[in-house]
Image (cartoon, grey):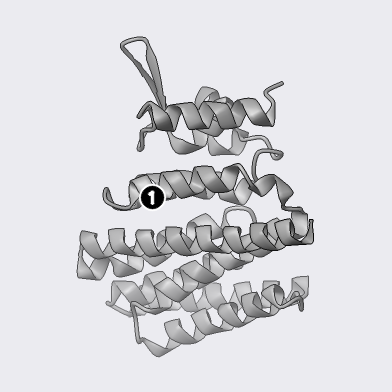
Amino acid sequence: MITRQERLERLDSAIAEGRIIHSKWRRVEGGREYVCLLAALSPEVADAEDAEDCPADVMPLWLALLTPDLDDYVSHEYRPTLIRRYAGLAHRWHVLDADAWQRCDWAARRVALVEARSHTDYEPSVEVCDLVIALLDRALAGDEPSAQEWADAMTVARTVAMTVASTVAETAAATAAAASWAATATAAAATAAAEKAAAASWAAGPAAATAAWDRIAEAILDAIEVEIEMAEGDG
């Protein structure tokens, strides 16, 4: 059993020694182990090469699934900040309970949808993004929508996404609608929505997509930090 302190020491050591890599789970070079950001906290992930193997007491599944994308797709310039902030929050997020983590999840989905929405003015795509954002806002305000409301939103979002994808040439419109559909799902929702949001920016080129990932990553870390600060204040 790996203790929380051992995991944090493993992460800190990898960062201090420049052994954090991206686009690969792990590699050994010159007798030194290099690991991605998630694998630095979870050697289980490195062994399985699967984010789903990250123990639930390390972080919730949605964040484990999202972390490799954040690590892989942010800009070269932003990556050191991402790694530093992520590690700092990892040292503190043990104070978060299930409700706080759920709010972080909803916030991450919202961040992705706002990003996706910003890349299109195609009305059906904008409307369905706004529909799901409104549900997420309710959830974040303490008025969690019912399972039926989420299911109804998923049905609408799926219909719009499929219709837009088959009838509209604008890629951003299709991917924004797809992001709204993705954001109504469960464990992988934040990851899928973020991926769609970044894809929506591709019409403006790869640099725009990278900038979108930077904004998404920063906003998600901000949301986690807000919850940590509230929890620490309550303590």
Mark 1 sits on what residue? 81
| Amino acid type for the residue under numbered disc 1 | Thr
Q: Is residue 121 left or right of residue 233?
A: left
**Residue 216 x, y percent position in the rendering:** 43, 63
**Residue 131 x, y percent position in the rendering:** 57, 83
Under tag 1, what secondary structure? helix
Q: Is residue 7 above or below residue 62?
A: above
Is residue 183 in view from this perspective? no
Between 180 and 2, the one lying in front of the other is 2
Q: Is residue 7 left or right of residue 203?
A: right
Q: Residue furthest top?
A: 31
Q: Is residue 23 above or below residue 130?
A: above
Q: Is residue 160 above or below residue 179?
A: below
**Residue drawn where x is 54% and y is 72% of the image:** 158
Quadrant, the N terminus:
top right
**Residue 93 x, y percent position in the rendering:** 65, 48
Q: Residues within 10 Å of mark 1 (few under 14, many from 20)?
A: few
Quadrant, the C terminus:
bottom right
